[in-house]
């Protein structure tokens, strides 16, 4: 379930990790930690995409969109692989709002 929480972020942004967090948080401390981490990462990405959108008016946002997208894909896959092995994964660039 922890791996699914990380992968759902790629498909549903913050909605998938949020639903999984709300459903499974009382069943397993490991799944709660990992889905909270995935949810926090998706919220951080939402902020980064908003900043990129604002910066598209000065053209640098176009490049920032690409960088954020590729980084999100790579980090989400790394997190899913770590969660599949049963390891705790913490995203390097993450604003931790949900604990």
Image (cartoon, rainbow, N blue to C red):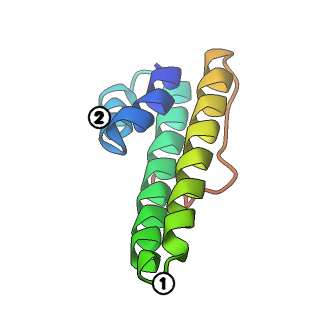
Q: Is residue 97 visible?
A: no
Residue 61, placed above or below residue 26: below
Left or right: 94 as drawn, with respect to 32? right
Dot label at residue 75: none
Under circle 2, the secondary element is helix
In the image, farthest residue toward the top: 85
Under circle 1, the secondary element is helix
The front one of 57 and 82 is 57
- Whichever of labels 1 and 2 marks the residue nearer the N terminus, that label is 2
Q: Are marks 1 and 2 in contact (CB under 8 Å)?
A: no
**Mark 1 Cα shell of 10 Å, populated few (<14), some (14-19), many (≥20):** few
Q: Is residue 89 visible?
A: yes
Residue 89 in which image quadrant: top right
> Which is in the foreground here, disc 1 or disc 2?
1
**Mark 2 Cα shell of 10 Å, populated few (<14), some (14-19), many (≥20):** some
**Residue lying at 40% horizontally and 78% vertically, measured from the top left:** 54
Residue 93, placed above or below residue 18: below
- Residue located beneath label 2 in the image: 19
**Residue lying at 47% horizontally and 69% vertically, measured from the top left:** 52
Q: Position of residue 15 (x, y in %)?
A: 30, 41
The front one of 90 and 81 is 81
Q: Position of residue 1 (x, y in %)?
A: 46, 19
Residue 85, placed above or below residue 22: above
Dot label at residue 58: 1
Left or right: 34 as drawn, with respect to 86? left
State the CA–CA distance, disc 1 to disc 2. 36 Å
The front one of 60 and 31 is 60
**Residue lying at 70% horizontally and 24% vertically, measured from the top left:** 87
């Amino acid at each position: 379930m922890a791996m699914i929480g990380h992968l759902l972020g790629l498909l549903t942004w913050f909605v998938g990790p949020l639903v999984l967090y709300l459903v499974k948080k009382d069943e397993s401390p490991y799944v709660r930690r990992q889905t909270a981490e995935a949810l926090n990462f998706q919220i951080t990405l939402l902020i980064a995409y908003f900043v990129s959108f604002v910066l598209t008016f000065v053209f640098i946002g176009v490049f920032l969109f690409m960088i954020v997208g590729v980084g999100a894909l790579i980090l989400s896959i790394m997190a899913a692989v770590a969660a599949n092995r049963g390891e705790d994964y913490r995203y390097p660039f993450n604003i931790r709002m949900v604990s």
